[in-house]
Amino acid sequence: MLEVHHVTKHYASRPILRDVSLALAKGERVALLGPSGCGKTTLLNCIGGIDRVDSGRIELAGADLATLTSDGLSLVRRRQIGTIFQFFHLLPTLTAEENIEMPLQLTGMAKAERLERVRALMQRVGIAHRSGALPAQLSGGEMQRVAIARAVIHRPMLILADEPTGNLDSATGAQILDLLREVTEEEGTALLMVTHSDEAARACHRVLRMLDGVLL
């Protein structure tokens, strides 16, 4: 479903990714571990189409991201990829419900269908009672649930998660991992998760380790 072939990436002549290759199958959960600054987040950004690679190839469901125009890449991000950021990145002027709804707005889904899907998912992740709250009014666990709901609301084939439990207490983090496990198993969505947490790694099928831009 996802194939990364011999990818390299530099910033200002400094090598960040060095000949990285990996693959994910449908429904597979993979943890990516390594020290800060080793290239994990850069790899997520390249797979998510935020950064372009210098060399190598990234294929999502057989489509080579390097061959896509900016508009084509935006379409892939909107429809096929869900991203969970370490610091949530919720839009501060939108309510929890509106933040989750946004990906569906970008796909052009009718409002009635959007609201039905959003409200069902909010109920499932346990934040329906906070639908009208702004991000500043939410706890860390609530914000992370909104961020996860936003990432999966459009039923992507791939979720990219950057430290999804890094800012949470252990009990809330365990609930978030259970939620991610359920989503990947029920929807057949693949998950690539950057983490420093052994508990998060144990929730995955495989663990990959990175050091100095190289997959060990």
Image: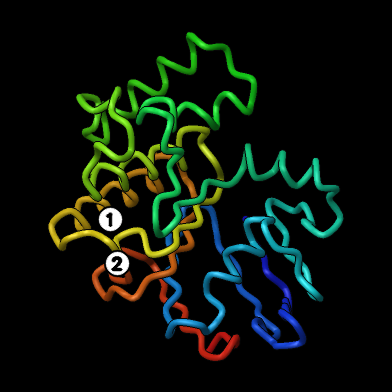
The structure residue drawn at horizontal position 27% and vertical position 61%, both measured from the top left corner, is 167
Please report contact status of discs 2 and 1: CB closer than 8 Å, yes or no: yes
Q: Earlier in the sequence, mark 2 or mark 1?
A: 1
Q: From the viewer's perspective, tell me whether residue 15 is left or right of residue 96.
A: right
- Residue 200: image tag: 2
Task: Find residue 48 and report its horizontal and vertical position in percent.
Answer: 63, 56
Task: Find residue 125 and report its horizontal and vertical position in percent.
Answer: 26, 36
Name the residue tied to disc 1.
Answer: 177
Secondary structure of the residue carrying numbered label 1 = helix
Q: From the viewer's perspective, tell me whether residue 85 is left or right of residue 65.
A: left
In the displayed structure, would residue 146 be above or below residue 133? below
Crowd class of label 2 (few under 14; some 14 to 19; many from 20; radius 10 Å): many
Task: Find residue 101 and report its horizontal and vertical position in percent.
Answer: 47, 26
Marks 2 and 1, Cα distance to the nearest angstrom?
7 Å
The structure residue drawn at horizontal position 68% and vertical position 54%, both measured from the top left corner, is 60
Q: How is the image coloured?
A: rainbow
Q: Amino acid at mark 2?
A: Ala
Q: Amino acid at mark 1?
A: Leu
Crowd class of label 1 (few under 14; some 14 to 19; many from 20; radius 10 Å): some
